[in-house]
Image (cartoon, rainbow, N blue to C red):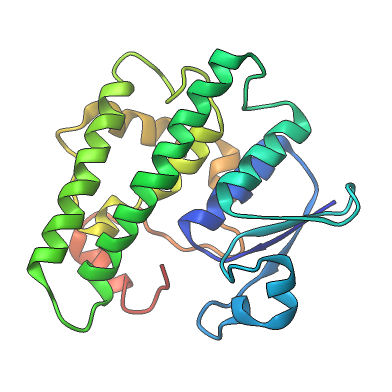
Amino acid sequence: MIDLYTSATPNGYKISILLEELKLPYKVIAIDLATKDQKKPDYLKLNPNGRIPTIVDHDNDEFAVFESGAILIYLAEKCGKFLPTDPKGRSLVLQWLMFQMGGIGPMQGQAHVFYRYAPEKIEYAIKRYQDETFRLYTVLDTQLEENEFLAGELSIADMAAWPWVRGYLWAGLEIEELPNLRRWLDVLAERPAFQKGIEVPYKVDRSTTTAEDAREKGKSILI
């Protein structure tokens, strides 16, 4: 049994999607970011960084894993799925996983902050992070031109990137000119595990139809 400490955020969705794909039994412990559950002493014992997600594997001596990328690798290796074992295939998946962890996540996260939550609208910051996020999207679009998924076969790299990219409107972006990226988003959105994963710990709809809809929803939803 896996305990999943999570919230309705892209990083949290990565893990619930993978758990659903793996069909592993897991228990959800919802972390309320608004009341800073993630900073409480008991939680910090599991995750010293005070962020989500975290898992505890009861089948492995109550082993705790934090950092979403590390959790994805741990679970994929535990079950022998979605991360190849051959050096080339494994490296390819990890390259695209690191691309999300070091690029899309931080840059789009900052785009969210400056576009939606900053008390002062700083146009330079908004443009800087939106432009860089879109540039990263174009890299994905190019990769997906000849590949159904980021590393060829469905992998943890797709599960890491998809929850972020599906929120492009949340960052104030449009992707009409990126057909391969749009195709990839739609294909993954049809998978039952992805549909279930984004309802953990509760459903938050970020696939809104317009930036204005997203802006309105942003007044009451945590990133």
- On screen, residue 62 versus residue 184, left or right, reads right
Residue, x 74% and y 26% (percent of image)? 80
Q: Is residue 196 in view from this perspective?
A: no
Query: Measured along the vertical axis of the image, is residue 52 above or below residue 193?
Result: below
Residue, x 46% and y 22% (percent of image)? 151
Where residue 222 sits in the image (x, y, percent)? 42, 73
Q: Nearer the viewer, residue 55 or 102?
A: 102
Q: Is residue 180 in view from this perspective?
A: yes
- On screen, residue 37 versus residue 142, left or right, reads right
Where residue 89 sits in the image (x, y, percent)? 55, 16
Where residue 209 sits in the image (x, y, percent)? 25, 54
- On screen, residue 173 versus residue 190, left or right, reads left
Q: Residue furthest left?
A: 123
Query: Measured along the vertical axis of the image, is residue 161 above or below residue 199?
Result: above
Residue, x 29% and y 62% (percent of image)? 110
Image quadrant containing the C terminus: bottom left
Query: Measured along the vertical axis of the image, is residue 169 above or below residue 114?
Result: above
Residue, x 18% and y 54% (percent of image)? 130
Number of numbered discs: 0
